[in-house]
Amino acid sequence: CFYDSVIRWGALSILLQFGLCVSGGSCPSRCVCRPETKEVICSGKHLNSFPEGFSSDVRCLDLSHNKIKTVGRRQFFSLSQLQELDLSDNIISMIEVEAFQGLQNLRLLRITNNRLKILPVGVFSGLSSLRFLDLRQNEILVFLDYTFKEMVNLQTLEAEENDLVFISQRAFFGLQNLQDLNIDRSNLTSVPTEALSQLQSLTHLRMLRLTISTLPTNAFRRLRCLRSLQISNWPALDTMASDSLIGLNLTSLVISGCNLSAIPYSAFRHLVYLRYLDLSYNPITVIQGNMFGDLLRLQELHLAGGSLLRIEPGAFRGLAYFRMLNVTSNQLSTLEESVFHSVGNLQVLRLDGNPLACDCRLIWVVRRRLRLNFDGHQPTCSSPDVVSQRKFRDFSEKEVPRLFTCRPARIMARRPQEARVEEGTTVRFSCKTDGDPLPSITWISSRKNVVSPTGRIRVLPNGTLEVRFAQVQDSGTYQCLAGNAAGNDSLTVGLYVKGLPRNRTILFFSEEGWTEPSNPQAANSSAQMAKPYPFDAKTLIIATTMGFLSFLSSVAICFVFMFFWSQSKGQIKHTATIDFVPRSSMGGGGDGGEGGRFTMKLI
Ligand SMILES: *[C@@H]1O[C@H](CO)[C@@H](O)[C@H](O)[C@H]1NC(C)=O
Ligand SMILES: *[C@@H]1O[C@H](CO)[C@@H](O)[C@H](O)[C@H]1NC(C)=O
Ligand SMILES: *[C@@H]1O[C@H](CO)[C@@H](O)[C@H](O)[C@H]1NC(C)=O
Ligand SMILES: *[C@@H]1O[C@H](CO)[C@@H](O)[C@H](O)[C@H]1NC(C)=O
Ligand SMILES: *[C@@H]1O[C@H](CO)[C@@H](O)[C@H](O)[C@H]1NC(C)=O
Ligand SMILES: *[C@@H]1O[C@H](CO)[C@@H](O)[C@H](O)[C@H]1NC(C)=O
Ligand SMILES: *[C@@H]1O[C@H](CO)[C@@H](O)[C@H](O)[C@H]1NC(C)=O
Ligand SMILES: *[C@@H]1O[C@H](CO)[C@@H](O)[C@H](O)[C@H]1NC(C)=O
């Protein structure tokens, strides 16, 4: 250590003398020196190589916007006081190993916008005080193992806009204090999970413009300090494993500009400290009810530019601190008060850019239109026609109760519906409704279940209940419930299915199993009967048994007939005697045999 400082002192004094004697100052030609701040500015001077004649106490050196091509070994060895070095916007394609050796006080290094392709291991050796390293806009292909090994104090690494195809597993080894890592527009094909797991202090991770399609399980393991994760513009990302973010304790999460078609609720569930969530620019169509309940501290949700059609009631239930909802530029026709835990806490609401139906459901927004912060973008009515294109701000107090109205749901043509049909028939019950907004229709089966839009018993898109191939057990009452924001209505219908005697049953064996054509439609193997109902086992057994019974009775009748026939023939011979000539080799042919005669008893 002593030896080292002696050498350095020697070099320094030589330089000092050189500077004083030759140039009469300590400022390289073509550069601007500011002795008071110890800055040397050589930016934009068309320099092809490093200038000579620096004062050794330079703190900041700006060599940006020149034509420097390479950085040699120990290029800055004498500038031990240097704290900031800017090499941006040159044409550097090569930095030799140990180029920055001796810069033990350097805190900031910019090599932005150069032509680096490779960073040999050892390039950054000696930079033990470096806090900030900017490698943006180069053509770096890989980060090799141990590239940043000695940079124990590095806090920020900017690696955006390189051609990274690979980050080696131990590339970030030694970066024990790195807090911010930014990667952008690279050609990585998977999350460099192993490499990232070395960064125990990482708090902010931004990964932009990647072509990764999946976030696998445990993608960010061991990043216990990570608080903010930004994943943006991954156009291929359409899958997130439900435990892809496991182990993280985030306060801010951005997954925007990706291809997620649904909110991956289960992946977020454990993020109980999350305050900021941005899922903008994903083709998400719905925010479901009661799915964010675990994100107790969530304050802001951004889902701008998505494909949102609806936000279900209770979507933000349990979120007592929720204060900002940004759903600008979606396909929402409304936003009901019931989606929020408490509308009183809501401060900022971006609802513009949606085809809003201005009826009673939005009256809560209009009433708060002067208090709510619309971020400079007033919501605009899209329907009904009388208010089309009007901004919320422009409605007078008087108009609001008259214009923002709803008509409660009502079921039309309420004549009692009852159907008595035979088994196998297809029955439909209509439930025609009226109301504004258009009521939702739900059918409840006789067993108190909600009827789904698929299956043998289903609800058609127009609200009609359809029971195909009615069976006896389908009998009972069905209830149609129609409802909208203004009111509910219901209608009960009855279905009575009469069983048929199972005569002349014809069975068809199709790919799906035994099917019975109860009506002509079912016999048609068109798409209409894509789901033939399976033949029930009881019937099969009965049919089989009946078949056997008739077979047995036929046999019995046959025997009886033969018996009577034989009786009518009178005397029957009970023994038969057969003569034969035994060969000499076959002596003692049969037991009852005596000589050449064999007697057999007939039964
Ligand atoms: C990275 O991707 C870009 C665009 O897809 C492509 O032009 C470039 O050649 C790729 N680079 C490498 C090293 O694969
Ligand atoms: C996004 O997902 C859809 C299907 O969900 C697919 O058709 C489309 O190609 C995907 N886009 C990209 C860029 O991968
Ligand atoms: C998670 O982060 C929050 C806020 O940053 C912090 O208060 C909490 O202690 C962290 N929890 C764990 C388990 O690290
Ligand atoms: C809402 O989202 C849009 C689009 O991403 C953005 O421009 C705007 O700043 C956001 N508003 C707020 C208040 O954050
Ligand atoms: C509903 O649709 C079915 C079949 O698509 C049709 O038979 C029925 O008449 C429709 N009902 C009403 C009320 O429009
Ligand atoms: C309609 O029914 C739903 C569910 O049963 C209920 O929550 C709602 O309050 C009812 N609406 C009106 C206006 O009665
Ligand atoms: C058999 O069933 C058909 C209906 O499928 C009925 O019309 C017919 O009368 C029945 N025949 C006998 C003998 O019961
Ligand atoms: C059978 O299916 C064809 C089309 O595949 C259709 O034209 C015909 O009407 C169907 N017949 C019956 C009885 O449903």
Image: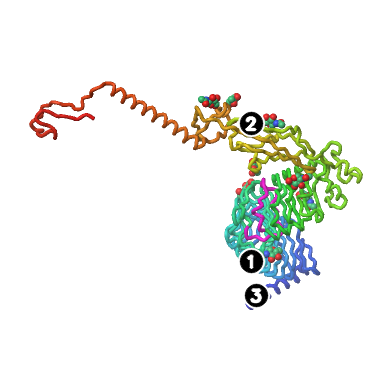
Position above or below: 329 against 87 = above
Is residue 260 visible in the rendered image? The answer is yes
| Residue 393 percent across, percent down from the top left | 88, 46
Which is more N-terminal, label 3 or label 2?
3
What is the CA distance from the residue labelled 2 to the residue labelled 3?
108 Å
Q: Main secondary structure of the magenta part?
A: loop
Q: Amino acid at mark 1?
A: Gln
Question: What residue does disc 3 label?
Answer: 7
Q: Which class describes the residues within 10 Å of circle 1: few (<14), some (14-19), or many (20+)?
A: some
Question: What residue does disc 2 label?
Answer: 420
Q: Are marks 1 and 2 in contact (CB under 8 Å)?
A: no
Is residue 112 visible in the rendered image? The answer is no
Which is more N-terminal, label 2 or label 1?
1
Q: Is residue 38 magenta?
A: no
Q: Residue furthest bottom?
A: 2
Q: Which class describes the residues within 10 Å of circle 2: few (<14), some (14-19), or many (20+)?
A: few
